Amino acid sequence: MELLEKLSVLADAAKYDAACTSSGVKRGFQPGRIGNTSSSVAGCCHSFSADGRCITLLKVLMTNYCVYDCKYCVNRRSNDTRRAAFTSRELAELTIGFYRRNYIEGLFLSSGVLRNPDYTTEHMISALRILREEYRFNGYIHAKAIPGSSPELIHQMGLLADRISVNIELPSEEGLTRLAPDKKLSGILDPMSQIRDSVFQSKAETSKYRHAPSFAPAGQSTQLIIGATQDSDKKILDLTQSLYRRYRLKRVFYSAYVPVVSNPLLPSADTKPPLLREHRLYQADWLLRFYGFKAEELLTDDQPDFNPLLDPKCNWAVNHLDQFPVEIMRADFESLVRVPGIGVLSAKRILSARKVSSLNADDLKKLGVVMKRAQYFITCRGKMLPGLRFSPGTLVRQLETAEKKDIPSRALDQLSLFDQTG
Ligand code: SF4
């Protein structure tokens, strides 16, 4: 098969992998090396930098041959699909060629399991080694560790990549057993522990010794498929929280399940990907990482799924009306950021602006507060917004109506999916 044909097969096969955004790694130009990484343009697949530029990683599989048979995957061994495999040199030359032509700013490399996890990982390491050592490539590399690979190979991979990740794929062990019978939870969690410890150790060594080898300086991430099983949003969010806490992950990525194969264990082939649900989970993830929320505050056993028509902070607030309204002129930072429509930045602005003047609704808008949400949950100098009419019984409907205007009709069409996927 011609190289470009391989590229078309293996780039297409990689499109379901979502775990591919900013790395945060900053590494300037080094004499004798090609490329750099910058936190402002860091390793995004078709993303936009602060100055509006579209930035790109070459996102490919080493091979889409796979000896595993994960039911949800287009590359599973029992699926009749076109197969290809790069040699290590082909992949390295393709990457450096694209980099020199300014098509890409880095590489995102994953793979199907060729023969066994160790054989595949050796193949990937060999490509990364040619890139780093022969071509002196200094740009961003995100490599997927193959579950079940030996610790020694994972270590070698981490010394060559900026970010390394192991996909957890499904929210429960039961789902994994049913839909990915060749994968073992321990084959996913053990490498995560190893990567956490190696990143920690490497940070300590590089801060002491300038030339100490750096292990995955952008840390590790993982990906969860949403909607392939009946797992609730609560199950997913609880898992996310424990992954952040136990394995110090930089990111958990959520990937709406796209039906590519028919199987009685999966949602039907005409099911649309639950993109709005994926979006709500990303919003909730943000609340865990930056707003001090805990998973158990956002969802409960009685309410295990988000209302898709409300953002998760609104969803929490309407269920905790006893904590509102919040007085804008007196509330502390922690209370302000819990108000729907007030973000971290606008809360900081409120804290400084209220030192010099009394704030009203117009001032809050200027400070970046989204008043269509916040108005129901705040007072300014003890008073709610003049003319505002609502009761606890009508509040959810009023917020949903306001929120609906921001949801693309394409996503609203998918709401029926929530009934099918829990
Ligand atoms: S291991 Fe499973 S998810 Fe990965 S490529 Fe093979 S079949 Fe697909």
Image (cartoon, rainbow, N blue to C red):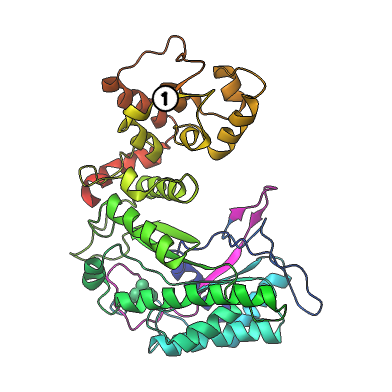
Q: Residue 112's quadrant in the figure?
A: bottom left
> Residue visible at 63% across and 75% down?
95
The residue most toward the top is 387
Q: Amino acid at mark 1?
A: Phe
Badge 1 is on which residue?
377
* Residue 54: x %, y % from top left: 64, 54
Residue 414 in the image: above or below residue 108: above
Would residue 418 appear left or right of 148 to someone viewing this image? left
> Residue visible at 52% across and 83% down?
155
Asked if the residue at label 1 sits under 8 Å from ligand 1, the reply is no
The residue most toward the left is 264
Structural crowding at the residue carrying mark 1, measured as other residues with C-alpha within 10 Å and reported as few (<14), some (14–19) or many (≥20): many
Q: Residue 209's quadrant in the figure?
A: bottom right
> Residue visible at 61% across and 72% down?
203
> Residue visible at 59% across and 62% down?
23
Q: Nearer the viewer, residue 384 or 45?
A: 384
User: What span is in magenta?
Assistant: 47-76
- 48 magenta-colored: yes
Would residue 183 appear left or right of 342 to someone viewing this image? left
Judged from the image, the secondary structure of the residue bearing numbered disc 1 is helix
Q: Nearer the viewer, residue 316 or 12?
A: 316
Q: Quadrant of ligand 1?
A: bottom left
